[in-house]
Image (cartoon, helix red, strand yellow):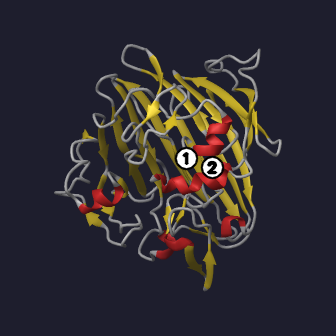
Amino acid sequence: MKTSRRTVMAAAAAGLAATTIGTTTAHAHPHGSEGGKPERELFGKLADGTKVYRWSLANGGTRLKVLSYGGIVQTLEIPDRHGRYKNVSLGFDTLEEYVASSPYFGALIGRYGNRIARGKFTLDGKAYQVSVNDGENSLHGGSKGFDKRVWDVESFTSGSDIGLVLHYTSVDGEMGYPGTLRVKVTYTLTRRGDWRVDYAATTDKATVVNLTSHVYWNLAGEDGGSVYDHELSIGASRYTPVDSGLIPTGELAKVACTPFDYRRSKTVGEDIRAAHQQLLYGQGYDHNWVLDKGSTNAPQQIATLRDPASGRVLDISTTEPGLQFYSGNFLDGTLVGSGGTIHRQGDALCLETQHFPDSPNQPSFPSTVLRPGDTYRSTTVHRFSAR
């Protein structure tokens, strides 16, 4: 998603400067025990003294590090076709960097992933104004969304699977949203190395909810340079065109004969510089694909990303009806990642499973309304392999 995002950073930095605390604790294995219990260490403290922890997990050949701040995936390591590990998600080494300047690297997103036009919507006849932080629009829950909150985290083992359960309660009126929303997100590393994300939420007042994860992927590794040679396929015959503010127009346009046709695998860069108005608006891809499968009770595969050089493959399955493909257009060389690499335009991409942007203002889009007595549920599974 777009980093006029840059406007999001200032609010996070104000009053939230962080202090990094040491390095790995003496008893913590750098990657966690393979198939063993997740391990916790102190990662840092926020300006108000709140402690932030880092959890290390390893299972089925996948290694994962997660922060209690923002539920952030700091690193995710998988092997290439020769068994060589690399971190394939962008992140930072220190808490200070996440607080001051992160464009949502690896974070949990809420209450509302993506954009709401002018930060306004009407629900049950009442008008709401939520936090505006992306020009005149609201992006990813506002200036202090779920990505900037400290989550309560518990580890678990379940048979041969391991994982984390993250809890956060968003109070009534937080960032302008109605209702006290109780959120539970479960990260599971399965015995075969899949990373599964299960979202659940309940409310005491009608509200809107759209939760997602904002990992920046580069299957060549965080220092792998451009992802334009990655091969991508998306199971979608339509997408939602946007205006100059990246707000959907309401149209469900066909991808056929456009740069947005990823029904058959092609490289990310094949059409990214085509003379198409939608690419000009996004400075590349920053759009929602309307998945052919629609909303489903169980996750169904909807996208495959492959790096030909390393052989690493990411298959994504989800219950969600939409997928935001963002091609890292606003990485501008001002951020240095955890591997000591400067990240430039196109050095990673995001594949955010979701309901559609601006759905509260688009009656024809699938509803994002959650009411008391109902439970919001969403699941996305990331399957890794190499060939």
Residue 317 coordinates in the image, percent (x, y): 43, 44
Look at the numbered disc 1 and give the secondary structure of its residue. loop
Asked where in the image residue 120 lies, by quadrant, the reply is bottom right
Residue 118 coordinates in the image, percent (x, y): 52, 73
Q: Are marks 2 and 1 in contact (CB under 8 Å)?
A: yes
Residue 270 coordinates in the image, percent (x, y): 21, 42
Asked where in the image residue 183 lies, by quadrant, the reply is bottom right
Q: Is residue 129 above or below residue 7?
A: below
Dot 2 or dot 1: first in sequence order is 1
- Residue sitting nearer the eye, 58 or 324: 324
| Residue farthest front in this picture | 334
* Quadrant in which the C terminus appears: top left
| Residue farthest right in this picture | 49
Label 1: how many residues lie within 10 Å, few (<14), some (14-19) or many (20+)?
Answer: many
| Residue farthest left in this picture | 257
Q: Is residue 200 visible?
A: no
Label 2: how many residues lie within 10 Å, few (<14), some (14-19) or many (20+)?
Answer: many
The residue positioned 51% from the left and 33% from the top of the image is: 336
**Residue indicated by mark 2:** 147
- Residue sitting nearer the eye, 3 or 51: 3
Q: How many marks?
A: 2
Left or right position of 327 against 178: left
Left or right position of 321 against 158: left
Amino acid at circle 1? Tyr
**Residue indicated by mark 1:** 104
Left or right position of 271 against 182: left
Amino acid at circle 2? Asp
Look at the numbered disc 2 and give the secondary structure of its residue. helix
- Residue sitting nearer the eye, 224 or 161: 224
